[in-house]
Amino acid sequence: EIWEEVVRFQSSLRRMFASFGQGVLFSETVLPSQNNLWQARMDVIPVPKNVELDAEIYFKSSLMEMAEEWGTHTKLIRMSSQKKVKNCIPKGFPYFFIEWNNGGYCQIIESSNFSKSFGVDTLAGMMELDPVRFKKGMKAKDGDRSVVLKLCEVWKNFDWTLELDGAGVGA
C-alpha cells in the first residue's frame, strides 16, 4: 500500500513538472546505518527535458565507474515500468536507484562509504553545477518561504490526496 502511494505521488509530480515543460528524476538511496537501522533518502529533482533525456547515459556511466568501489555486485539493473525495484533487490540489501520517465537503473551497494548524495552529485556534474549541500540545523533563507508557498499553491492542482478528502484534484 505504501509503495502504491509513492507511485501515485511520482505520477502527480511528473504531471506537475510536465505542465511547466520540465522532466523529473527520482533518486533513492537505501543504506544501513549504526545500530542496524536503515536510512533511506528519496530525492525529487525537476530538470529540463533535455537533461531527463540524457540521464540514462550519464547515470549508466557514473554507476559503472563506481561499481568496483561498491563491491562484487557490479551488474547494473535496468528498470522499466514493468520491472520495479521492490522486485529486483532482495529485502535487506542496500541500493541506489535512479528513475526517469520511461526507465531507470538500480545498483546494489556493498560499500559503507557510498555517498548518500550520489544521485544529486551526479546530476550536478551533468548540469555543470556545484553539488547542493545541506547542513544540519541550517536556517532557511528569507526567499525560501515564498518559494515553498508558491509550490504548495501549484501542487493543489495535482495533489491526488485531495481525492481522499472528496475535494478532487484540480478542484
Image (cartoon, grey):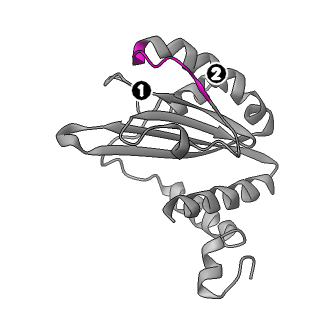
The percent position of residue 141, horizontal first and vertical second, equals 46, 52
Q: Which residue is mark 1?
A: 109
The percent position of residue 157, horizontal first and vertical second, equals 72, 72
Q: Is residue 33 above or below residue 111?
A: below
Which stretch did the figure color magenta?
Answer: 69-77
Residue type at tag 1? Ile
> What residue occupies the far left of the structure in this picture?
35
Q: Which residue is mark 2?
A: 60
The percent position of residue 106, horizontal first and vertical second, equals 55, 32
The residue positioned 52% from the left and 46% from the top of the image is: 86
The residue positioned 66% from the left and 22% from the top of the image is: 58
Residue type at tag 2? Lys
Q: Quarter holding the C terminus?
A: bottom right
The residue positioned 53% from the left and 58% from the top of the image is: 3
The mark tally for this picture is 2
Depth order, front residue of 6/24: 6
For disc 2, the neighbor class at 10 Å (few under 14, some 14 to 19, many from 20) is some
Give the secondary structure at mark 2: helix
Describe residue 20's horizontal placement relative to residue 95 as left or right. right
